[in-house]
Image (tube, rainbow, N blue to C red):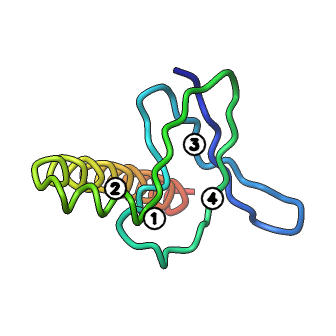
Amino acid sequence: MGSVTVTKQVGPGEEEQLAVLSSGSHLGEAMLVDESTERAITAKALEKTFVLAFNPAAFRELCEADFELGYHAYRAIALGITKRASSFMNQTAYYKAQTLHH
């Protein structure tokens, strides 16, 4: 339920919108895989939004205690990261092609 805007700071007091995530989306999964990952984005609810947050250490503990749950959780994280990376690469290729043709 809800939607979230995802931004990153690009300069003093200046933000760039990266995405608008809708219900069922997830973000911040890199912190669940590697706690040393620096927080690079800001998420702000655009409307009433239900958020489920995990403590990274408790999440890993839960996945280690239940291997089937861990498998499904980390597979979902991997698929999400892969989807985002693929989208980013496609957008980058599109914009690069547009630049080369102008």
Residue ID at (89%, 61%): 13
Residue behind mark 2: 81
| Discs 1, 3 touching: Cβ within 8 Å | no
User: Callout 4: helix, strand or loop?
Assistant: loop
Q: CA distance from mark 1 to mark 3?
A: 19 Å
Badge 2 or badge 3: first in the primary sequence: 3
| Discs 2, 3 touching: Cβ within 8 Å | no
Residue behind mark 4: 41
| Discs 2, 4 touching: Cβ within 8 Å | no
Horizontal and vertical percent for residue 68? Answer: 10, 49
The disc at residue 19 is 3
Label 1: few (<14), some or many (≥20) within 10 Å?
Answer: some
Which one is closest to the eye, mark 1 or mark 4? Answer: 1
Which one is closest to the eye, mark 2 or mark 1? Answer: 1
Vertical comparison of 41 with 37: above or below: above
User: In the drawing, does residue 12 fall left or right of residue 76?
Assistant: right
| Residue that extends furthest to the left in the rendered view of this protein | 68
Q: CA distance from mark 4 to mark 3?
A: 10 Å
Badge 4 or badge 3: first in the primary sequence: 3
Horizontal and vertical percent for residue 48? Answer: 66, 21
Horizontal and vertical percent for residue 91? Answer: 45, 51
The disc at residue 31 is 1
Label 3: few (<14), some or many (≥20) within 10 Å?
Answer: few
Residue ID at (72%, 53%): 16
Q: Amino acid at mark 4?
A: Ile
Which one is closest to the eye, mark 1 or mark 3? Answer: 1
Residue ID at (60%, 26%): 49
Q: CA distance from mark 2 to mark 4?
A: 15 Å
Badge 1 or badge 3: first in the primary sequence: 3
